[in-house]
């Protein structure tokens, strides 16, 4: 009996380290003593060797276009020789075209426990009738004489039995005619039930339609022999799983279409990974921060749109650009190269246990003059032996840095102020007190930062309510947002000592928890002592002055009467009358002072309202009656409600009286107008008094001129304009005195009532 031959084509590409082609030949001859093994290194040599008859071909030629062309040449020379394919990797896919050309077995020797035994087992599987000690039962020459159809069936049976991926065959009507064990196991099917099933029972309608269209295109095509598409298989338990189907059409001897064969691969995990990747890509593109990926050379190999926007370049143009390129373009400063290099060196160092690092750098987007400050948090890309680059997240911290710098400036200012600055939460616990305040009340910063100091600890019990009432009033609709209240109270130091204090209180934005507050407090001990001294002196002086003036006035009147009636001394009587007149003026001035004092002692939290038109009309009517020689012209609206009270009457009286008294004519002319003015800070009314006299003496203007100082030689002759200025200013208004060439113009500006 002639010895059989096994042809071994270039196995070196797929052999594990330490195994040679000679070792492979020895393994086959050891398993099959009556088989000769011939090793060739090229497809041409293998085709030439086929002419001598071959029982089995073992090939490691890659199954690309060139490899498939070689298999076709093999089939042209020998229709029935079994082919064993040695794969380069365990998961290497065997094309359906290769299976249809007779690749009946494929193995990967690289991952086998015993590569030589694995190769011998593969040869044994395609020569089942051969025993280890006997030669093959049939040679290639005898196989070629067998019936072609029977041999094809045998080849397909071998294919279905040994292919690890699920394989199926369907006829031209779409019914399953053959299926391998892998597909049955994967889908949980029974062979008897599955064979003969129509594809519509195991595939969704859309996938059936897609597969039908593909097969139709393959049948009509003269070039394409196979196609790959994705579809779902409905498993026996009703679940669906995604697969990739590589399908080829089959023809009978007459060339008519008779069905298709397909090899399917489970891609559920791959599709899941793709969906996860898509989710991650969506997240990366959605985050407001920039995300970038650099390779080992510092080139951009990935990132999101935001990262490209941050440096002012297109995302597509950014890929392949290096950090050095961005430095050359003026987008980054050169210092970033050294900083980045140092951080990477530290992260890859075995001595470092850090996985991430942060650093700040400056960017000029697209090389512009505008500078932005970015903060990058970087980590190493996964790697085995060699550094592969970094991945990072970048935030634009320019605004944050500016806010921090601004806060630092404010903090410096706050700590430099000698008064107490404080903030308290909705429950009255202090959340902040500056250093001056901590010293004033005797607390440490640690005690303050612990938020355990309550308002009641620094304010006497009977005065805490003042602050609550002030906040309620400030939050009412009567007051503008941003206004503050002045609260006077008795402050209590930590050691129990007490002192008079004053706080300018302001509410913060109300929340569901309540209203927080802030304020400026100061020790007013010295001011209180000064006010008490002044009050005592003022009370004594007013009491004594009033009594003494009344006594002088009575005696001066008596003296004038006696000199005229008893002594016929007219000159002496006139002197006494002058003394009487001067005394009456002093009494009147004293009365004016008391009236001014009462006007200025009102609560500044109050916002009284009064109709200026009615008030001015009454004052002018009184002056017109007392001074018939004065001409008074008016231009008044129907109504002008301003923020003021009855003390405004004293103001208008003083201004009109001033215009009359300082006039050098017996027939003064006075014009009084009230007009509404729309200013940037709201709506106001202006009360203007214009006269045609010589003007107000300059020494009297010290009361309304902020740039003048009261001196012994320049102080004015009375308190009229002082009263005007003080009272108007107490309502938040202003006084302006000007000359228009023919007299004086006094303008009182008062805010329009809300």
Image (cartoon, rainbow, N blue to C red):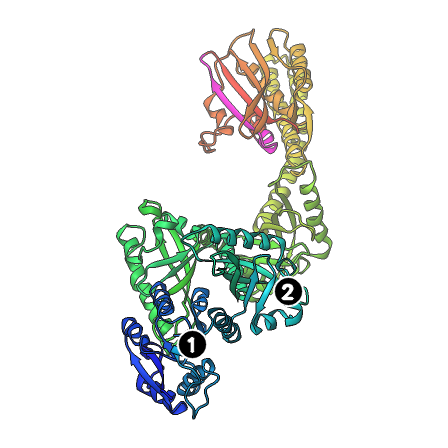
Cα–Cα gap, marks 2 and 1: 31 Å
Left or right, residue 400 beside residue 629 = left
State the quadrant of the C terminus: top right
Tell me the SS state at disc 2: loop
Residue at point 47% right, 82% down?
Answer: 125
Q: In this rendering, is residue 27 above or below 664?
A: below
State whether residue 82 appears in this view.
no
Q: Is residue 328 found inside the magenta-colored segment of the image?
A: no
Instruction: List x then y, in percent, for residue 515.
Output: 67, 50
The residue nearer to you, when weighing 703 against 147, is: 147
Q: Are marks 2 and 1 in contact (CB under 8 Å)?
A: no
The residue nearer to you, when weighing 289 against 428, is: 289
The magenta segment is 726-741
The residue nearer to you, when weighing 373 against 322, is: 322
Instruction: List x then y, in percent, for residue 488.
Output: 65, 48
**Circle nearer the N terminus (2, 1):** 1
Look at mark 1 in the image and give the residue it sits on.
Answer: 143
State the quadrant of the N terminus: bottom left
Look at mark 2 in the image and give the residue it sits on.
Answer: 196
Tell me the SS state at disc 1: helix
Instruction: List x then y, in percent, for residue 52.
Output: 31, 78
Task: Classify mark 2: residues with Cα within 10 Å, few (<14), some (14-19) or many (20+).
Answer: some
């Amino acid at each position: 009996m002639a010895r059989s031959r096994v042809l071994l084509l270039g196995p070196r590409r797929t052999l594990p380290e330490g195994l040679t082609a000679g070792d492979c030949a020895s393994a086959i001859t050891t398993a099959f003593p009556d088989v000769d093994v011939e090793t060739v290194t090229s497809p041409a040599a293998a085709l030439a060797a086929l002419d001598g008859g071959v029982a089995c071909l073992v090939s490691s030629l890659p199954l690309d276009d060139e490899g498939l062309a070689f298999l076709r040449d093999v089939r042209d020379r020998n229709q029935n020789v079994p082919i064993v394919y040695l794969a380069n990797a365990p998961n290497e896919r065997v094309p359906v075209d290769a299976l249809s050309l007779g690749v009946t077995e494929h193995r990967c020797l690289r991952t086998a426990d015993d590569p030589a035994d694995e190769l011998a087992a593969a040869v044994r599987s395609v020569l089942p009738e051969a025993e280890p000690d006997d030669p093959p039962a049939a040679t290639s020459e005898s196989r070629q004489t067998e019936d072609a159809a029977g041999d094809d069936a045998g080849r397909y049976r071998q294919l279905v039995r040994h292919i690890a991926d699920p394989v199926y065959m369907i006829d031209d009507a779409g019914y399953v005619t053959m299926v391998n064990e892998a597909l049955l196991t994967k889908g949980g099917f029974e062979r008897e039930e599955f064979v003969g099933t129509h594809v519509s029972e195991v595939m969704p309608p859309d996938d059936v339609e897609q597969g039908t269209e593909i097969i139709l295109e393959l049948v009509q095509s003269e070039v394409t022999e196979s196609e790959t598409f994705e579809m779902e298989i409905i498993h026996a338990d009703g679940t669906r799983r995604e697969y990739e189907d590589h399908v080829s059409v089959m023809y009978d001897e007459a060339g008519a279409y008779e069905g298709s064969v397909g090899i399917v691969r489970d891609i559920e995990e791959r599709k899941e990974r793709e969906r996860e990747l898509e989710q991650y890509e969506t997240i990366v593109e959605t985050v407001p921060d920039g995300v970038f990926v650099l390779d080992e050379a510092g080139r951009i190999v990935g990132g999101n749109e935001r990262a490209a926007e941050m440096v002012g370049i297109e995302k597509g143009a950014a890929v392949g650009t290096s950090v050095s390129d961005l430095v050359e373009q003026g987008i980054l400063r050169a210092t970033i190269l050294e900083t980045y290099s140092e951080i990477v060196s530290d992260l890859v160092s075995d001595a470092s246990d850090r996985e991430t690092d942060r650093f700040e750098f400056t960017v000029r987007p697209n090389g512009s003059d505008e500078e932005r400050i970015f903060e990058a948090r970087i980590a190493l890309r996964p790697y085995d032996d060699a550094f592969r680059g970094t991945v990072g997240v970048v935030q634009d911290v320019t605004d944050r840095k500016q806010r921090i710098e601004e806060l630092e400036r404010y903090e410096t200012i706050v700590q430099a102020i000698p008064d107490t600055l404080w903030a308290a939460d909705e429950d009255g616990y202090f959340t902040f007190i500056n250093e001056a305040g901590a010293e004033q009340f005797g607390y440490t910063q640690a005690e303050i930062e612990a938020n355990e100091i309550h308002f009641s600890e620094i304010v006497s019990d009977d005065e805490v309510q003042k602050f609550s009432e002030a906040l309620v009033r400030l939050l009412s609709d009567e007051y503008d947002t941003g206004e503050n209240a002045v609260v006077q109270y008795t402050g209590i130091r930590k050691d129990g000592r007490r002192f008079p204090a004053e706080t300018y209180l302001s509410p913060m934005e109300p929340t569901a928890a309540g209203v927080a507050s802030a304020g400026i407090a100061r020790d007013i001990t010295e001011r209180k002592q000064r006010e008490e001294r002044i009050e005592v002196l003022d009370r004594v002086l007013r009491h004594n002055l009033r009594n003494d003036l009344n006594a002088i006035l009575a005696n001066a009147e008596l003296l004038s009467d006696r000199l005229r009636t008893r002594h016929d001394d007219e000159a002496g009587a006139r002197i006494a009358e002058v003394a009487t007149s001067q005394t009456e003026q002093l009494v009147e001035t004293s009365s004016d002072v008391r009236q001014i004092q009462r006007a200025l002692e009102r609560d500044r939290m109050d916002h009284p309202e009064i109709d200026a038109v009615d008030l001015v009309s009454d004052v002018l009517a009184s002056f017109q009656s007392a001074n018939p020689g004065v001409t008074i012209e008016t231009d008044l609206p129907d109504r002008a409600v301003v923020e003021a009270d009855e003390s405004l009457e004293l103001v208008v009286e003083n201004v009109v009286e001033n215009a009359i008294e300082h006039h050098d004519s017996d027939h003064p002319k006075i014009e009084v107008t009230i007009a509404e003015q729309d200013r940037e800070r709201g709506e106001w009314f202006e009360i203007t008094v214009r006269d045609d006299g010589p003007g107000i003496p300059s020494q009297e203007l010290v009361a309304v001129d902020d740039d003048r100082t009261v001196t012994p030689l320049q102080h004015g002759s009375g308190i009229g304009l002082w009263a005007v200025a003080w009272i108007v200013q107490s309502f938040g208004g202003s006084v302006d005195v000007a000359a228009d060439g023919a007299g004086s113009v006094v303008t009182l500006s008062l805010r329009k009532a809300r």
